[in-house]
Image (cartoon, rainbow, N blue to C red):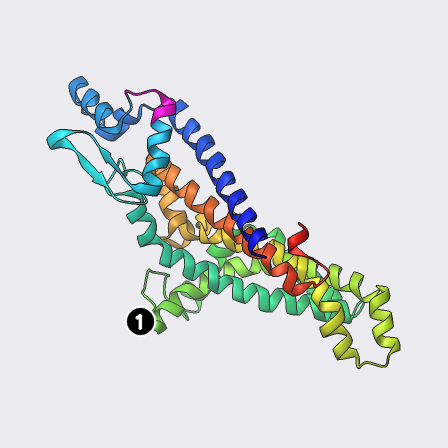
Amino acid sequence: MIVYLLKRLGAAAAILLVICALTFTIFYIAPDDPAQRACGKACTPERIEQIRDQLGLDTPIPGQFASYVRGIFAGRTYGTGSTAVECPFPCLGFSFQTNVPVQELLVSRLPVSASIAVGAAVLWLLVGVGAGVLAALRKGSWWDRTAMGAALGGISLPIYLTALVLQYLLVVVFEVLPYPRAVGLLEDPAGWFASMLMPWIALAALYAGMYARLTRTELIGALNQNFVRTARAKGLPERTVVRRHALRPTLTPIVTVFGMDLGALLGGALITESVFGLPGVGKLAADAINSSDQPVILGVTLFAAAFIVFANVIVDLLYAVLDPRIRLGAS
């Protein structure tokens, strides 16, 4: 297990390094001059050259990339002498718009994105997996047809449409919820819950449909396997057959998809946060794209990629728990 974990962590680090290199290359081959962008529109050529020196843009690109990677692990210093600025570990540069370290912006926005992602994930797992299990056990019934029809509808509706409809109905028409706003969980638990409920429902409506259909398909396949027939032939109760023998292998692909989805959402739900006006990582990315704030775009990309990559490592480790036939040491 330890050897396998070390191999997976090494592979994850290599993947992140490749992503960092690709994103960094795109960052520097873009038509916008980073020094001009950092300086603003009303800027003298002398000031632009000074900024290029501070940011290290006057060195070859391989050297700039090495400095950037070194800054992530050990911090770095921008400029020299009296104009030197320290960027602490893990340094992702400074925002061109606010001159705030990118890592500070990400950390300040993470609680909102985490609240949206985790809450929506709990909701779509309960609804999606539960509906899929019932649909598989009652294959061909009215519940099966109704649940799968609702799932198809949830998948088909774009998230921005669902979000706007929810705001119109729950805030404007029925006035049962306030407009979403950034509220700390510990500061105001009730206000936090009320503000997060619509984003949770909007995301869960999309993902629950996918999980319901996936669960139904996998469970129906598992129920037709020989090992399930053997368990029934031994006289085990149907509930035990489903829970202990059919459901466990069904959960393996669900866990795989769940790790990807949760990792991506922890890196920012761009559309959801933008529609509801919540200051999460996704909203930060949208604002950075609109203003061509290149260090923030690069930082958010690496941030989101790290969540997805390490979520996959955790998923691989869970395989052995869900399916004893998988031997991690042999991988």
Q: Is 66 placed above or below 270 here?
A: above
In this picture, residue 212 sits left or right of residue 13: right
* Residue 178 location (% of width, % of height): 36, 66
**Is residue 61 shown in magenta?**
yes
User: Can residue 209 be seen in this snapshot?
Assistant: no
From where the camera sits, is residue 282 visible?
yes
The spot of residue 213 in percent (x, y) is: 69, 59
Q: Which residue is mark 1?
A: 188
Q: Is residue 220 magenta?
A: no
Amino acid at pointer 1: Asp
Nearer to us in this view, 222 or 32: 222
Q: Nearer the viewer, residue 25 or 79?
A: 79
Name the residue at 78% across, 63% down: 222
Q: Which residues are magenta?
A: 58-63
Q: Is residue 218 left or right of residue 70?
A: right
Q: At x 42% / y 51%, what residue is drawn?
A: 275
Image coordinates of residue 326 in percent, x first then y, are 70, 58
| Image-quadrant location for residue 219 | bottom right
